Amino acid sequence: MTARPLVVVTDHLAEAGVEKPVLDGVADVLLLQTNSEDDVIRRGATADILLVYHDIKLSDRVIAGLPKCRAIIRCGVGFDNVDLEAAGSRGIVVCNVPDYGTEEVADHAILMLLATARRLLVCDAAIRAGTWEAASAFGTPRLRGKTLGLIGLGRIGTATAIRAKAFGLRVVFYDPLLPDGVEKSLGIERVYRLEELLPQSQFVSVHCFLSRETRHILDAKTLALLPRGAYVVNTARGGCIDLDALYHALESGQVAYAGLDVVEREPLNDERIRKHPRVILTPHTAFYSVEGFDEMRTKGAMEARRVILGEAVRNPVNLHCLTGARAVVRSEV
């Protein structure tokens, strides 16, 4: 009897209650519950497909130890923790799940904007300390008429723009990868250089993926372009912001408040940021809702099922460096 294909979940999951029904009859599922590449090499070498979350990084070294692997599916939007070139050169298709948490992350970005602007935690902390003073909220700006600059206008950036417009914010975006005319369909404004976006943005929210071009896209130089006292929100990738530069911008008053769901090193190990009174933090949870998490897991498993059944994958992200694909990809993608 021929063994069924093996789908290996590397990290994050302690049970496979969502994945097993999707893959029932076509594959076995193995949970590694590890963030160690050595564990993947040792225990996952027979995998036909890897389902990967954000707690682990897959380098060339570990990908070279996956002789049977046809696809690596990143159960989430970002895929910077997978070496795309290493996978592509070996015929391994890398896919993501780009649409599961659009609403949640956009909601979270607006949450952080509102919480910082309206001094939510400042007021809450003051009341818990025994005071009841309106002065806790002094400095709160009116949102209507202010400019929100979006760095990136993919699915989540678009959803954030729509929400921001409802608060009367003027929305301007920078995204060099989008075709002309997107701004017209959304009724927002566009600039073609980051240096045009930042000086007019009292609020800036990051919604781009992490790449060589976007790593530290907000650093000392670019943060200095913001209007003094600007607000910074990041629900995208931690590496998009230079935390040291952000700290100094907060200390100087160049940045008034920051809301961070992601940081470059997770868990956060920068005590200056962790304890800063004008920083709001959440532990990389913007993606999460009960419904969204189930959707992400289901769609990741469905992509694995397509690979096993010889159907074309829906969301490949390494076609630019893929040779001799071991899974079916659409030629027109």
Image: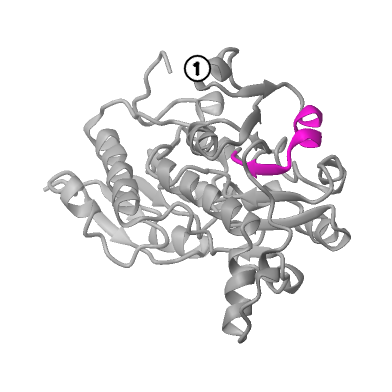
Residue 278, placed above or below residue 148: below
Q: Residue at x 66, y 47 (%)?
A: 142
Residue 51 can be seen, yes or no: yes
**Is 46 left or right of 120, judged from the image as shown?**
left
Q: Of 67 and 317, which appears nearest the observer?
A: 317
Q: Residue at x 50, y 60 (%)?
A: 55
Give the magenta range: 194-207
The image quarter containing residue 150 is: top right
Residue type beneath disc 1: Ser
Most extreme residue toward the bottom is 130
Q: Of 254 and 101, which appears nearest the observer?
A: 254
The image quarter containing residue 331 is: top left
Residue 150, placed above or below residue 291: above
Residue 73 can be seen, yes or no: no
Q: Which residue is mark 1?
A: 185
List x then y, in percent, for residue 110. 54, 48
Magenta stretch holds residue 284: no
